[in-house]
Amino acid sequence: MPASDTLNTLPLPDLFTALCRGGLVRRLLELARDEDLGCPHADDAGHECSGRPSRHCGDITTQVSIDPAAMATASLRFRRGGIVSGLAAMPMLLGIFAPACTARVLIADGATAPPGQTAATVSGPLDEILGLERTLLNLVGRLSGVATRTAEYAGRIPAGSRARLYDTRKTTPGMRVLEKYAVRCGGGRCHRMGLFDAVLLKDNHLAGVGLESLAEVVREAAARARAGHTPAFIEVEVDTLEQFERLLTLPAGIIDIVLLDNMSSATMARAAQMRDAQNPMLELEASGGITLDTIAEAARAGVDRISVGALTHGATSIDVGLDIDA
């Protein structure tokens, strides 16, 4: 999986491919298959299910009501407008749920779909389409909701601002790589992927560390990180200007980013002035309680990054439907 900085330079198709390399997306979709169609591992004779569903797995309603030879085409439509995300997963979805089907993607991820717009069509055996339906809608609806919310936040950052919008780790368990992909679809940027690819020393890591020793503790931690790992960046959280002032005593390059946690715009502006005077290459990140109403003010304070957990944990799924064409 690519380092965090690389995630923000790859075009969306390449980003999706890179995020799939670790196998997390396939594992997620296979779990979605098993939770909807049942565990396919064994039949009465102990053989693994293959081909059409056995009595131990599959869509019972479809089995008893649909001719296995029936063919159809279904249209994936946006009932409410929004930013499209998740259609890059269509080939993998077909391989897992509907291997005899084909799909046409009509709107690329990252584009805007107006209400009523057909974003993709799926053609093939009707029973496979019906087995695919709910997972496809859940995935595209959820990711398009994240992308749409991200676009709303990104659109509130004033033109010409140095600030860029970032996500957080406040994601749905198991869906992080996909939700971070959706943030990129909406015009945002990805923060660290997890605990494994970057260093972020937060208040709990620094609990009990006094002002006098803060800079030295951070310096030692940064040295250990670079000696034993290749972190995408080293970041430290502060919630007072006194803490920030101590970090500014470190030589340039020891840390890459300082997170200004739950600070007022006036306090962040003062921190930006201090940074400009003493370590201009140090990036500042605003975080904590940023809303659609306050993001512009935070951007005008002079920070480089604004991280918003609500891009993911506060997103509402877009209403999409799969209609069988008559």
Image (cartoon, rainbow, N blue to C red):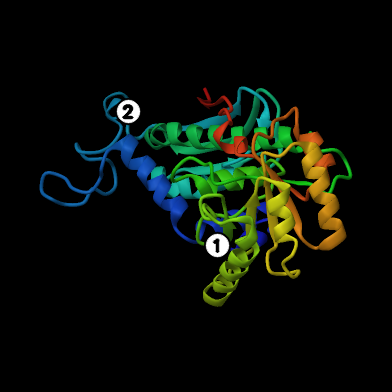
In which quadrant of the rendered image does the N terminus lie? bottom right
Residue that mark 2 sits on: 62
Residue in front for this viewpoint, 8 or 89: 8
Instruction: Give amino acid for label 2.
Output: Thr
Q: Which residue is drawn at 39% across and 37% down?
A: 128
Q: In this view, does 223 lie to the left or right of 97?
A: right
Q: Counting residues from the N terminus, which is met first, the one under dot 2 or under dot 1? A: 2
Residue ID at (45%, 32%):
133
Q: Which of 197 and 244 is in front in this view?
A: 244
Question: Rounded to the nearest whole Å, what is the CA distance between mark 2 and mark 1?
Answer: 44 Å
**Outermost bottom residue:** 227
The image shows residue 122, relative to residue 203, as above or below, that is above
Up/down of 208 relative to 130, above or below = below
The percent position of residue 132, horizontal first and vertical second, equals 42, 36
Name the mark on residue 181. none
Judging depth in this view, the residue of 56 and 179 nearest the camera is 179
Q: x and y percent of residue 287 in the render?
A: 67, 42
Note whether 201 is above or below 65 in the view shown.
Answer: below
Q: Which amino acid lies under the numbered mark 1 shown in the image of this protein?
A: Asp
Observer-side mark, 2 or 1, equals: 1
Task: Kindly state the secondary structure of the residue where label 2 is placed.
Answer: helix
Q: Is residue 45 above or below residue 199?
A: above
Dot 1 falls on a residue whose secondary structure is loop
To which residue does mark 1 refer?
197
